[in-house]
Amino acid sequence: MDKFPSGVEPEAFARELDRLELVSRLAETSRNLFDEGPHLISTAELPWGDTVRELAIEVTRRFIHGETWITGGGAREMEAEIVQWMGGLLGAPEPAGFLTSGGSESNMCAILTAKRRAGRRGGSVVFPDNGHYSLYKLCHMFDLDPIAVPAPAGQLHLVDPEAIEAAIRPDTIAIIATAGTWAYGSIDPIEAMGEIALRHGLYLHVDGAFGGYILPFLERSGYDRNIAPWDFRVPGVCSISADLHKNGMAPPPAGSLYFRDASLLALAKEICPPNGTMTGTRGTGPIAGAWTMVKLLGEAGYTAVSLKSMAMRDEIVRGVGEIDGVDVYPGSQINMSLIYSDTLDLRPVAEELRGRGWMFAARAIPAPVGVVVVPMPHNDGQIPAFLDDLREAVKSAPALPDSTAEADLEKVSSYGF
């Protein structure tokens, strides 16, 4: 074939595809400390990692042409199996729910359900100000006032339940908590927030996008015996989101939303027919890929993956603690760490790390910037090299001025942070 119908030559297309793949840095995945997708690799602890990852990708390909309307019979069975299994692990005796495109859609569907339950067109939603940006987005989309409650002074990872309750207004329809906060990895005081929700007759949604597919396994493994109840064991919790394309290891897009029971799912379907999802047409490929991960890993596999990720998180925490001028923000209970400094300007440090090939996220709070890393199995063996580069980069970091000007904070976005 000389040309495609569009006039593009096969050789030219192949060159363009190679270029786009190169700029996407797909081949550098081991140095990506903030990835989403199938992160499994084979290691001593996870000898089946490559096989499971490749099967998940292959199953996604086999189902890539389907959608859940006509050709979705198999995918609907897969979805139901995931909901029953994971919903049960999250403590729901009769779990209900569905798969979504990710945490943002899951949060949106939960709050639309809360609106339907409250029978209001407008109103307000209360959540700690460490909540994900999608919470602000959904409030603007759904004619709701976002009431973001500030953290206690100097303790950005903490939430004051009394402040949450004081923020409730007569028109409040829901409270949102987070299990695995961005970017501290902490868990909001969900037991206390559940009591508040019950006391005021409010819907309580838990955003577990990061924590949902790691916390249940860490708790059951005995790794962390200080994980307070945060899921459906808390009576006030109505729904929980959890991203399969994060710690669930599935190919994106693959989020999930779990309801305490079918009555809440029915409300979601009333406002977002026929599935309860924001999206009408849903591809079966991501559902099949997620189901493959759940089917092949199960509780034992996810436990091993979780412990591997946390071992690297702990390696980062120990290593950063040995570098003068930087520290890890306290409170993390999942594989997420925020590297920050009270005395140094880390903006050039972040630029230097990126120049050395590291991929990560960044956060402007605490100002002016911190480095956010979420190690997963594909980062196996990379943590010592990252720490070495961090140690070198920090040597040239300038001291922070007494106060950081707003103009300096605005520069953060220009660096792609």
Image: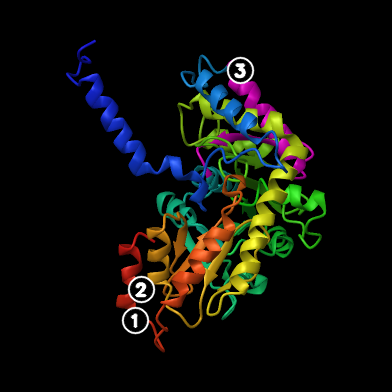
Does the image show residue 147? no
Q: Residue 92 in the image: state x and y as whole percent.
A: 76, 42
Badge 3 is on which residue?
Answer: 74
* Residue that badge 1 annotates: 405
Who comes first in sequence, dot 1 or dot 3? 3
Q: Examine the rendered structure and indicate whether residue 176 appears above or below residue 260.
A: below
When the figure is inspected, residue 85 is found, relative to residue 206, above or below; the finding is: above
Quadrant showing the N terminus: top left
- Residue at 22 percent of width and 26 percent of height: 12
Quarter location, residue 298: top right
Is 208 drawn above or below residue 400 in the view shown? above
Image quadrant in which you'd find residue 169: bottom right
Residues at marks 3 and 2 touching, judged by CB atoms closer than 8 Å: no
Q: Nearer the viewer, residue 402 or 20?
A: 20
Mark 1 and mark 2 residues within 8 Å of each other at the beta carbon: yes
Q: Which mark is residue 409?
A: 2
**Residue range corresponding to the magenta coloring:** 73-102
Q: Amino acid at mark 3?
A: Gly
Q: Position of residue 383 (x, y in %)?
A: 58, 57
Residue at 48% from the left image edge and 27% from the top image edge: 282
Please say if 242 is above or below 393: above
Q: Residue 236 versus residue 34: which sits nearer the camera?
A: 34
Q: Residue at x 50, y 43 (%)?
A: 105
Given the current orientation, which residue lies at the most extreme left position?
7
Q: How many neighbours does mark 2 have within 10 angstroms: few (below 14), some (14-19), or many (20 or more)?
A: some
Does the magenta run of residues contain 64? no
- Type of the residue with mark 2: Leu
Instruction: Give residue 332's quadrant in the image.
Output: bottom right
Q: Position of residue 111 (x, y in %)?
A: 54, 48
Disc 1 residue crowd, few under 14, some 14–19, many 20+, Cα 10 Å: few
Q: Seen in the image, is 261 located left or right of residue 275? A: right
